[in-house]
Image (cartoon, helix red, strand yellow):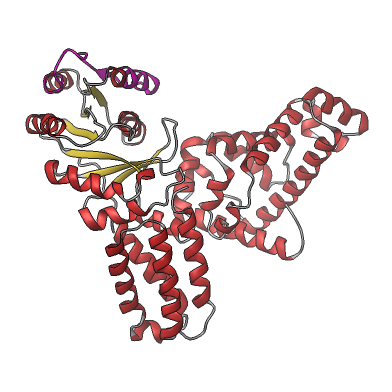
């Protein structure tokens, strides 16, 4: 994922000062040199890096930091706050009208994922923000874009308005606004045409649409894989259209992320959404402080909890959690956990959201973990209801039958049973730590979520020191 290399480099740079009792200008300069190289290698604009380092040095060498009990941690906080400022000190929500129809123009170059992003944003609006969006196919240059938007709209239950490729984009926009008024839509997203590069014809078409609809937001879609070109594209579109926000796609790819860190500082245009995958639900509202936490390896508890609330079967999860804490954890519960985890996404990405676990995320072989989970599901599903509820009855003949039925080996069955016993023990320890029981995921507060994660983290560290493996 973007920022992965940057996160690793910054974590190593901070290790040189966080363990020192006293902060000197020398070890400060050594740390800043590492931070500067980390940012430049992540493709952050040179001018942005220069100003960033200067601000950190000025604040870090002040008397308040040098005289503090833990100057190293103070420096990390300063770097964190400066990264938040780079990304945008506050969230940049959609500019919804208090009354009437909110109109949003989606603009961008061809190939940046603009049409898909339009549908993803409509999906977020409908499911999370209780809006009634209408998608409008204004890309009449590329017929495939209209069909693509219709297919995506159908998959999320959002209507797509189109007059076909024979009608000009401006006329389609005019008719769509009238249609939205007549049918009670409160939000209109106009998927406009893109080009392989910025040209006068494209900008004139967009300017004409803007002049008529007077959009509340103009969102520019940019590809995180293009690096510093994000800044160039954003500057060009912003100069001619006054773009109000960015939608960064493919942030889950191998991009270094420098363009995302540079664009707000140079253009003043905030990032509003980030695409983290190909699925229609793989789009998040952008939170600068949360992204800064993840870049510095501090995890992202709030996004993890929100993701769990959206994707997990909360009622089933609560029942299983209660059974776990009461010591009645069965293989049926373990199976449900596997199925819930698959909904949450890759294990590596989940670990990056847990404070203190980021350093272990890169050690996970995702393919092997996925293969093991599939095997474990097949093994449990091949057991009888009695065996799932009471695994202690599993003897050699039963293990052979289950292995044959699941297409695995007896060794695989034994490994699953061993993992089950370890997980059952860990759940009992978690029950003791939480004392009053784990709060239901659906009602979990921010403070409660952070407390539970800290307890889990503490338990994992203690287990590791004691030589136990889970």
Rendered location of residue 2, percent (x, y): 44, 49
Q: Give the magenta-colored segment's residue range.
A: 147-172
Quadrant location of residue 179?
Answer: top left
Whole-percent x, y for residue 248 in the image: 33, 43
| 32 displayed left or right of 419 | left
Q: x, y (%) of residue 360? A: 61, 56
Q: What residue do we see at 54% from left, 44% from top? A: 440
Name the quadrant containing residue 134: top left
- Image vertical order of residue 44 relative to residue 61, above or below: above
Q: Is residue 454 left or right of residue 205?
A: right
Say which of 181 and 176 sits in front.
176
Indicate whether 382 appears above or below 271: above
Residue visible at 68% across and 32% down in the picture: 374
74 and 324: which is toward the camera: 74
Frontmost residue, 23 versus 460? 23
Q: Is residue 286 magenta?
A: no
Residue 314 appears left or right of 236: right
Examine the structure image and report whether residue 157 is included in the region drawn in magenta. Answer: yes
What residue is shown at x 41% (from left), y 44% (from top)? Answer: 251
* Direction from residue 418 to residue 262 in the image, left or right: left
Check the image and report above or below for 259 versus 161. Answer: below
* Residue 439 in view here: no
> Could one spot residue 267 in this view of the protein?
yes
């Amino acid at each position: 994922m973007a920022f992965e290399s940057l996160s690793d480099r910054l974590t190593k740079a901070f290790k040189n000062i966080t363990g020192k009792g006293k902060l000197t200008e020398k070890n400060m300069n050594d740390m800043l040199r590492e931070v500067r190289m980390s940012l430049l290698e992540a493709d952050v604009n040179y001018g942005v890096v220069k100003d960033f380092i200067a601000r950190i040095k000025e604040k870090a060498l002040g008397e308040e930091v040098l005289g503090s009990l833990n100057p190293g941690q103070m420096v990390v906080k300063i770097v964190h706050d400066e990264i938040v400022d780079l990304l945008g000190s506050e969230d940049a929500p959609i500019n919804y009208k208090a009354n009437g129809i909110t109109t949003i123009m989606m603009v961008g170059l061809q190939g940046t994922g603009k049409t898909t992003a339009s549908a993803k944003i409509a999906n977020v609006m409908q499911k999370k923000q209780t809006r009634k969006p209408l998608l409008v196919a204004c890309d009449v240059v590329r017929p495939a874009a209209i069909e693509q938007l219709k297919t995506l709209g159908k998959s999320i239950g959002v209507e797509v308005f189109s007059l076909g490729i024979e009608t000009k984009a401006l006329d389609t926009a005019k008719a769509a606004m009238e249609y939205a008024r007549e049918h009670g839509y409160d939000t209109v997203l106009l998927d406009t045409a893109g080009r392989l590069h910025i040209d006068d014809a494209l900008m004139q078409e967009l300017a004409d649409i803007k002049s008529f609809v007077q959009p509340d937001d103009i969102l520019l879609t940019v590809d995180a894989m293009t690096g510093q070109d994000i800044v160039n594209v954003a500057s060009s579109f912003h100069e001619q259209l006054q773009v109000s926000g960015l939608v960064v796609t493919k942030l889950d790819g191998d991009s270094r992320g420098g363009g995302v860190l540079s664009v707000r500082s140079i253009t003043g245009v905030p990032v509003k959404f980030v695409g983290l995958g190909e699925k229609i639900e793989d789009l998040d509202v952008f939170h600068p402080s949360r992204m800064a936490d993840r870049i510095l390896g501090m995890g992202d508890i709030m996004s993890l909890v929100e993701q769990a609330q959206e994707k997990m079967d909360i009622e089933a999860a609560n029942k299983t959690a209660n059974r776990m804490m009461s010591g009645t954890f069965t293989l049926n519960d373990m199976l449900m956990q596997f199925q819930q985890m698959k909904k949450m996404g890759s294990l590596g990405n989940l670990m990056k959201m847990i404070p203190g676990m980021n350093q272990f995320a890169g050690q996970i072989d995702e393919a092997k973990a996925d293969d093991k989970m599939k095997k474990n599901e097949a093994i449990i599903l091949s057991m009888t209801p009695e065996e799932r509820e009471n695994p202690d009855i599993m003897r050699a003949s039963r293990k052979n039958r289950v292995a044959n039925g699941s297409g695995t080996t007896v060794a695989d069955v034994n490994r699953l049973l061993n993992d089950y016993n370890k997980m059952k023990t860990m759940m009992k320890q978690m029950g003791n730590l939480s004392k009053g029981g784990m709060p239901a995921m659906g009602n979990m507060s921010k403070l409660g979520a952070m407390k539970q994660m800290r307890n889990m983290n503490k338990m994992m560290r203690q287990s590791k020191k004691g030589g136990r493996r889970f």
